[in-house]
């Protein structure tokens, strides 16, 4: 299986590593035990608990394989916690943008880390693509269903 590299921040990589450990050390053994217990109930053809346990086990095994593949193909971007200020937007940066009177701070992350509720946006998203490579003072314009939105880049950290 030849997969392309996945961009991750150090924090995102660490979070995926932790999730993988929890799955392998805690959830997978419990799921295997649940299948064995359900199997002991007898007739497997009409054993709803057994079928449910097998589905849960398959889901967990699939998630483990997905995380292992992601981590194996991860390209961890350098930390932005350096003393030097970033000159242009890139993965790992926190970008302050202004739209009219409103200011927003977005954390540019890899596509697997994106979480709009936490203002973590993928570098592959429309806004992320528009911001990457830009510098403080530049303006960007993105197309949204309601029309076009203009942002001015105020700060890059």
Image: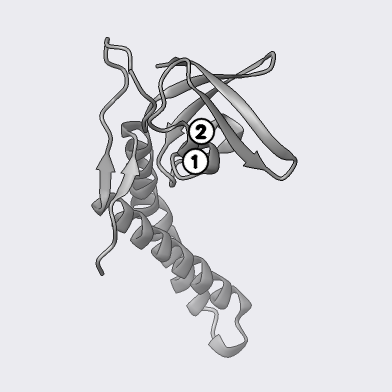
Circle nearer the N terminus (2, 1): 1
Residue 47 position in % (x across, y down): 60, 82
- Badge 2 local density, few (<14 within 10 Å), some, or many (20+)? many
Q: Does the rendering let one see residue 71?
A: yes
Q: Does the rendering let one see residue 43?
A: no
Q: Is residue 58 left or right of residue 140?
A: left
Residue 73 position in % (x across, y down): 26, 53
Question: Regarding mark 2 in the picture, which secondary structure is present there?
Answer: strand
Color style of the picture:
one colour
| Residues at circles 2 and 1 in contact by the CB criterion of under 8 Å | yes
* Residue 57 vertical placement versus 45 (above, below): above
On residue 120, the disc is: 2
* Residue 76 vertical placement versus 138 (above, below): below
Residue at left offset 51%, top offset 33%: 120
Residue at left offset 31%, top offset 33%: 10
- Residue closest to the far right: 146
Residue 144 position in % (x across, y down): 67, 42
Q: Nearer the viewer, residue 13 or 39?
A: 13
Residue 76 position in % (x across, y down): 27, 38
* Residue 96 vertical placement versus 109 (above, below): above
State the image quarter where residue 7 is shown.
Answer: top left
Q: Nearer the viewer, residue 59 or 143?
A: 143
The N terminus - image quarter: bottom left
The C terminus - image quarter: top left
């Amino acid at each position: 299986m030849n997969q392309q590299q996945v961009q991750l921040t150090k924090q995102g990589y660490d979070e995926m590593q932790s999730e993988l450990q929890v799955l392998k050390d805690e959830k997978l053994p419990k799921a295997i035990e649940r299948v064995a217990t359900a199997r002991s109930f007898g007739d497997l053809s009409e054993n709803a608990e057994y079928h449910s346990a097998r589905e849960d086990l398959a889901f967990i095994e699939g998630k483990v394989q997905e995380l292992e593949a992601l981590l194996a193909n991860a390209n961890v971007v350098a930390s932005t916690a350096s003393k030097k200020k970033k000159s242009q937007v890139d993965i790992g940066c926190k970008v302050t943008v202004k739209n009219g009177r409103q200011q927003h701070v977005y954390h540019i992350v890899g596509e697997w880390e994106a979480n709009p509720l936490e203002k973590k946006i993928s570098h592959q998203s429309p806004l992320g693509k528009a911001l990457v490579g830009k510098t403080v003072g530049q303006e960007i314009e993105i197309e949204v269903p309601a029309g076009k939105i203009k942002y001015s880049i105020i700060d890059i950290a």
